[in-house]
Image (tube, helix red, strand yellow):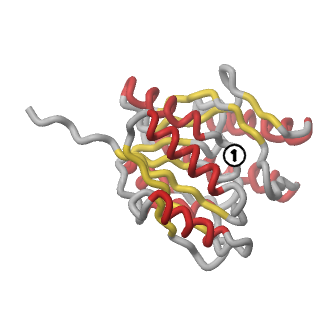
Amino acid sequence: MARPAQSKYSIILPTYNERKNLPVIVWLIEKSFTEHKLDWEVIIVDDGSPDGTQDVAKQLITVYGADRIILKPRAGKLGLGTAYVHGLKFATGNFIIIMDADFSHHPKFIAEFIAVQKTKNYDIVTGTRYAGNGGVYGWDFKRKLVSRGANLLASVVLRPYVSDLTGSFRLYKKHVLEKVILQTESKGYTFQMEMMVRARALGYSVAEVPISFVDRIYGDSKLGGDEIVEYAKGVFNLWLKV
């Protein structure tokens, strides 16, 4: 009887001005996969960073090899959703991990995502800040309130039965992500929420892993009134469509 092929994990890292963060996040990713003897690659989708992020990525290719680090830049800032679509074109793994490059998502949780996925062959494993021992660090009260309120609004209106809809630290079976992302119309702050709602509507199984979310170490992170209004509109548009 033939042994099943080993799983391979493709991490898609959208970047913009992450020169300082990129070397350390890649080192931590490599460390996690090496410790657990898992096959991996990182696909860096850089949107024309002016700070030298791509130069750092090229140096990382020389350190880890072109089979581990794949740089696929774009001309400018084109949005998170299209970054995942772009990265998917070059992914050779049968599982895709999406995460941020700014340490708000720590690679130490990847092993737990993989272990949980294997327990019941889940289609998606998503990190949650709002269940179990998950939490948010580095946010002021206003931003925590906005995030909690956004998730509560979506949960009440859309009933996806996931505690953290706006998180962007997830593991997908590759074919699942490809199908869900094709149906997703949002481009901004509502993108992650719509991805999960679409996945649930398609009948895909989802597991949650509590994570510690830490606000970015280097660079700026902004959430303004326009994003809040866009999110509320997105929730109700989804309610009408899905």
Instruction: Please state the horizontal and vertical placement of residue 71, each as a whole percent of the image.
Output: 51, 68
Q: In what quadrant of the picture does the N terminus appear?
A: top left
Taking 106 as reference, is 233 left or right?
A: right
* Residue pictured at 35% horizontal, 57% vertical: 92
Residue nearest the observer in this picture, 161 or 34: 34
**What is the quadrant of residue 225 in the picture?**
bottom right
Residue nearest the observer in this picture, 139 or 208: 139
Instruction: Please state the horizontal and vertical placement of residue 164, each as a whole percent of the image.
Output: 66, 35
Q: Residue furthest bottom?
A: 75
Is residue 82 positioned above or below 150 on the image? below
Is residue 137 positioned above or below 82 on the image? above
Q: Label 1: state its secondary structure.
A: loop
Residue nearest the observer in this picture, 189 or 121: 121
> What amino acid type should be assigned to the residue bearing mark 1?
Phe
Q: Residue furthest front?
A: 63
Is residue 214 positioned above or below 218 on the image? above
